[in-house]
């Protein structure tokens, strides 16, 4: 996975409407920090780079390299667990 990847949540996974929780087939996963903001943008149409650009606009003053690394780290962990997939 890289900044050009287009991702979506895997079947059976969805974000809770009101809580910072990812509903997964095995139960739930508590989300912290900007994780919900990142995962909510996985629509199967936008690239990871586009999502990073959105986050930089939302979190003014954030360093691009730091945001990019955080996003790629989170998405890599989610992909390893089978919670997200390439479009």
Image (spheres, helix red, strand yellow):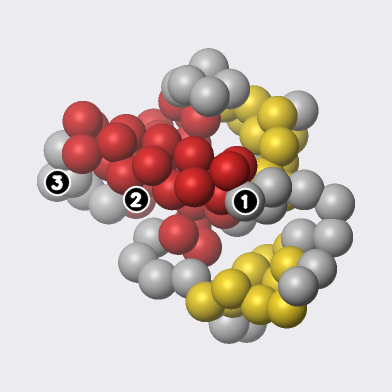
Badge 2 or badge 1: first in the primary sequence? 2
Label 1 SS: loop
Relative side of 68 to 22, left or right: left
Q: Which mark is residue 58?
A: 2
Picture disc at residue 24:
none
Q: Residue at horizontal 62%, vertical 82%?
A: 18
Residue marked by disc 1: 81
Residue at 14 percent across and 46 percent down: it is 61
x and y percentages locating residue 10 in the rendered image: 77, 48
Q: CA distance from mark 2 to mark 1?
A: 28 Å
Q: Determine crowd level at label 3: few under 14, some 14-19, many 20+ residues with C-alpha closer than 10 A.
A: few
On the image, the x and y values in percent for residue 2 come to 47, 21
Disc 3 marks which residue? Answer: 61
Looking at the image, is mark 1 or mark 3 nearer the viewer?
Answer: 1
| Residue 17 in sight from this viewpoint | no
N-terminal of the pair, mark 1 or mark 3, is: 3
Q: Marks 2 and 3, Cα distance to the nearest angstrom?
A: 9 Å
In this orientation, which residue lies closer to the viewer: 86 or 18?
86
Residue 7 spot, x, y in % from top left: 66, 34
Q: Is residue 41 above or below residue 37?
A: above
**Between 80 and 44, which is closer to the camera in this rendering?**
80
Q: Secondary structure at mark 2?
A: helix
Q: Quadrant of residue 23?
A: bottom right
Say which residue appears at 27% left-offset and 52% top-offset: 59
Taking the image as drawn, is residue 76 in sight?
yes
- Give the answer, above or below, for where 11 lies relative to 66: below
Q: Residue furthest bottom?
A: 19
Q: CA distance from mark 1 to mark 3?
A: 31 Å
Marks 2, 1: nearer the viewer: 1
| Callout 3 secondary element | loop
Q: Residue at x 58, y 43 (%)?
A: 80
- Residue 55 shown left or right of residue 26 in the figure: left
């Amino acid at each position: 996975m890289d900044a050009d990847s287009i991702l979506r949540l895997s079947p059976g996974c969805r974000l809770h409407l009101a809580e910072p929780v990812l509903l997964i087939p095995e139960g739930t996963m508590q989300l912290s920090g900007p994780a919900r903001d990142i995962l909510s943008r996985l629509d199967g149409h936008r690239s990871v780079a586009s999502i990073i650009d959105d986050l930089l606009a939302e979190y003014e003053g954030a360093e691009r390299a730091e945001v990019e690394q955080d996003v790629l780290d989170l998405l890599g962990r989610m992909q390893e667990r089978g919670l997200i997939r390439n479009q």
